[in-house]
Structures are given as C-alpha cells and as structure tokens.
Image (cartoon, rainbow, N blue to C red):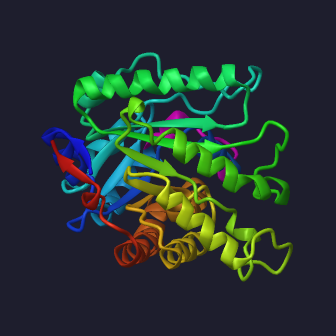
Amino acid sequence: MIKISQAKMDALNRLSNEKGLIEALAIDQRGSLKKMLADASTVATGEEIIDFKKVASEELTPYASAILLDPEYGLPATKVRDKNCGLLLAYEKTGYDASTPGRMPDLLEDWSVSRLKEAGADAIKFLLYYDPDEPTAINHLKHVFVERLGSECLGEDIPFFVEIVTYDTEILDASSAAFARVKPHKVLESMVEFSKPNYHIDVLKMEVPVNMKYVEGFTDDEVVYSKKEALDYFKRQSDLTELPFIFLSAGVSTELFQETLKFAKEAGSKFSGVLCGRATWREGVKPFAAHGEEAGRKWFTEYGKKNVETLNEIVDRCGTSWRSKVEVG
C-alpha cells in the first residue's frame, strides 16, 4: 500500500466519486482549444476561450467528480463549477518549444504550487512529453524536473498528478502504424520510470498502451496488434505500478474511448478512472463558436451530459478504486 497524508487522502476523496473512482473532465487545453474555436468561427479570442470553459464547467461538472482547468483561461470556470466537483489545476505551459530538442517541460512563470493551492486546487497536474529512448542527458533533465515538482507538491501537502504523453523523435506522426508498433514499449517504460518513489507522484495519468485503431477487431485496415497482444499490454501496464493510475482520452472519439475502457477491464487493468477531455466535449465547440453561447449550452445539456454520464457508467463498472492502493500513514 502507498502511504499518504490525511490531507492528500481528503483531497483525493474530493476528486472522486463515492466508490473511489476519478471521473474527471479535462478542459485545460489552451493552444489546441484556441485552434478548434478558430476553425469553427475563423477567430478565437482569449475571452471566447474563457467563456467556453465557463459554459462547459457550469453545464458538465454536476455529472463529473472533478474538473481539470488551467490558471491562464480557466479560473473563471472554477467559480461556476458544481459545489461537489473537485478541482485540478495545470502547472505546465501549453505545448513545447519545437526548436529545442527533447520537448522539454516548462512551468507557468507566474504560478507556484502554493498559488495554485490558494486558487482552490485540490491537486496539481503536470504534463510531461516523454520518450524513454531519448538520449540519457535529455531524460535526466526531465527526471530532475519532475522530482523538483514532486517535492514542491509534497511540501504543500497536495496530490501530484503527472500526465505522460509519449513520442518518438524519428516518427513524427503519432497516429501512424509505425508509432503504434513502438507505443507499447514507450508507455510501459514510462510507467516503470514514473512509478519510482523519488518523484512523489500520487496519481499517474496515462495513455492506454496501444493505439486501439490498430487492434484486431477494432479496425478494418492494418492490424498492428492481435486482440491477445493488446490485452496483454493492458495487463502488463497495470501490473507495472503500485500507484493509482487513470486514463487520458488522447483526443479519440467518444465511442472509441468508451470501448477502450471496456477492453481494459477485459484485460484485467486496475485503472482508477479517467481524466477525459476532447472525447467528452469536442463536438460542442462548433455550435458554441459558430452560433453563440446558448447553442453551445444546448449542446452540453443534450449531448455533453450524455457523454459524461455514459462514461461514468463504464468507469463505475470497469474501474478499480484507488483506495485499494492507498492508505493514510
């Protein structure tokens, strides 16, 4: 069992449902959301990004155990969330500097864990782009960086969620069959590395270990993994860590993400919930951007709510409480 403080235990409970499952909504996107809004309406101002997050938060948080927002555009949305919905705040800058090798991490310059906590955060989330096959010098810097953040969260006695997004320097298209072949190795090695206690991570936010679009039975095109191989990768991922972990949706369709969670359960994966972003709300961007707030609000109440509730039902049926791994001590 992982031992944590009472304060962290209380915070994790605020982020979870009564079963100890995290059914969280992620709307911390900044650059990608701005592009989605612009594509739908030709322009996207900071005010539009703020308003979209507010409407999404107000309409969807009554059905989510927690919401992940960013302090750049999302603080107004934190004020209109449901009173029973926990709050995670993102600590990283959006994107990465493509001119520098290694997709190096960076923090929001005018924020600290203490300030995020004062802003109401129940937990801190940090996104790390990670390739276990990068040169040792690059990954050493990333390891030290995450250690530093973990120590900061430990000092503030607040849960630390780390989101790992894998990549390969030689394969630029992460949706390709070529990357699908190496993805299990990347995800599993990342799982091992960031489960180490020196990082003081409380919850890992992970990709699923395969690209489901290349799994036998999920595609009519090229098959990269047999069903048995894919199930084995899910089981191995779960067995490689003692930490609670949750899945990110990685921008796949709502339906595919739902089927992926059922597949994970079939494999014996002990995931403890989701932090689901675009798979829940992406289709609401167009009515909001093209036709205004009321059209966006209507989409959230009709379709967004259904997406969240359907996902919750699947997580309730397929997830494993993080409380089975954690105790106060």
Q: Which residues are magenta?
A: 40-50
Q: Nearer the viewer, residue 7 or 144?
A: 144
Q: Position of residue 296 (x, y in %)?
A: 48, 61
* Vertical side of 42 occupied by 304: above or below: below
Q: Percent position (x, y) of residue 7? A: 15, 39
Q: How many marks?
A: 0
In the image, is residue 45 part of the stretch drawn in magenta? yes
Q: Is residue 186 left or right of residue 315?
A: right
> Is 43 covered by the magenta stretch?
yes
Question: Toward the viewer: 251 or 2?
Answer: 2
User: Compared to 34, does 93 lie above or below?
Assistant: above
- 23 sits to left or right of 184: left
Q: Is residue 145 left or right of residue 6?
A: right
Residue drawn 62% across the image and 64% down it: 233
Is 1 above or below relative to 140?
below
* Magenta region, main secondary structure: helix
Residue in the image at 43% along x and 60% along y: 274
> What is the x, y in percent for residue 9?
19, 47
Using the image as rendered, state which of residue 187 and residue 64 is in the foreground. 187
Q: Residue at x 25, y 23 (%)?
A: 155
Q: Is residue 178 above or below residue 48?
A: below
Which quarter of the rendered picture does the C terminus lie within? top left
Please indicate, yes or no, whether residue 166 appears anywhere in the rendered image. yes
